[in-house]
């Protein structure tokens, strides 16, 4: 009986508390609503960063990171170092990038768009991939491409050394196939006219020319090559143009070697 009475009083007290809370909310509800609206207005009054401002901050962070990566190396650079160079707090840096590698990936992606656009424009200038004038002009454009984006190529070597070329690998994927698609009709014309050596893929030949120009000027620009072919840049371009158009050995010499090879083969078969 005592237990029932205690529970009854507890229930009554609970109800009274509930009534008091409801009454308080009812009497002051307008105030709560007003305060809530005030807080909402204040929250809305806090200016949000525009996309332009966000991109500016990201660009500043990436520029700072790029300088440090090139100077110290990727693994020797910390997020704290990047924040300090960018003039921001470490916490704010993490608002934009979760990891140091994500900064590197963003830098590479931004550069890659520029490089791709430049390369497309360079290839658009070419009427005939193996025309002497077109090929020499292309060599000069490659020289400009390397010189104008030296930081990008330095990051490529950092990627090779520290990531086994994980981020830059796609830059060189399917190069010959892309050249074949772009200049396919011209390559077919050359083949039909008998201008090509038997068994030689012109897409591979033009891709090799591009890579040779690229590697030559990369060594000259970034590794102090100092005329490592012993020639001026223009002479190198002229020589490479002739090599990729004509080859190194004279056709008569090749024909003579071929005849001698056949005679040697016949003698060996008779023996």
Image: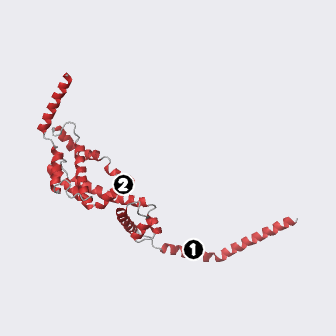
Q: Secondary structure at mark 1?
A: helix
Q: Nearer the viewer, residue 78 or 6?
A: 78
Please state, as top left, top right, bottom left or bottom right, where the C terminus lies in the image: top left
Quarter of the view holding residue 202: top left
Report the residue that reaches farthest toward the front.
Answer: 271
Left or right: where 162 falls relative to 216: right
Label 2 Cα crowd, 10 Å radius (few <14 / some 14-19 / many 20+): few
Please say which color scheme the image uses.
secondary structure
The spot of residue 138 in percent (x, y) is 20, 53
Residue 265, above or below 152: above
Residue 219, above or below 93: above
The residue pinned by badge 2 equals 161
The spot of residue 147 in percent (x, y) is 24, 60
Instruction: State the residue at coordinates (40%, 72%).
Output: 87
Quarter of the view holding residue 151: bottom left
The spot of residue 149 in percent (x, y) is 28, 60
Report the residue that reaches farthest toward the top.
Answer: 270
């Amino acid at each position: 009986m005592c237990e029932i009475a205690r529970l009854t009083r507890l229930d009554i007290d609970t109800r009274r508390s509930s009534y008091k809370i409801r009454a308080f909310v009812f009497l002051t509800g307008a105030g709560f609503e007003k305060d809530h609206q005030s807080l909402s207005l204040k929250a809305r009054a806090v200016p949000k960063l525009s996309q332009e401002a966000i991109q500016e901050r990201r660009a500043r962070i990436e520029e700072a990171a790029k300088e440090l990566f090139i100077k110290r190396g990727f693994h020797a650079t910390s997020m704290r170092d990047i924040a300090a160079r960018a003039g921001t707090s470490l916490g704010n840096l993490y608002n934009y990038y979760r990891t140091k590698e994500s900064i590197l990936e963003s830098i590479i992606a931004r550069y890659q768009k520029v490089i791709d656009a430049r390369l497309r424009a360079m290839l658009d200038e070419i009427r005939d991939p193996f025309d002497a004038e077109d090929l020499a002009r292309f060599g000069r454009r490659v020289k400009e491409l390397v010189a104008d984006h030296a930081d990008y190529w330095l990051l490529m070597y950092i990627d090779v050394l520290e990531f086994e070329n994980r981020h830059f690998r796609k830059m060189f994927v399917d190069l010959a196939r892309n050249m074949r698609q772009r200049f396919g009709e011209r390559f077919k014309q050359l083949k039909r006219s008998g201008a090509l050596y038997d068994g030689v893929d012109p897409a591979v030949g033009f891709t090799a020319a591009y890579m040779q120009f690229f590697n030559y000027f990369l060594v000259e620009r970034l590794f102090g090559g100092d005329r490592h072919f012993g020639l001026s840049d223009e002479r190198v371009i002229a020589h490479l143009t002739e090599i990729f158009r004509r080859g190194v050995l004279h056709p008569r010499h090749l024909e003579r070697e071929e005849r001698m090879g056949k005679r040697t083969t016949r003698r060996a078969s008779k023996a």
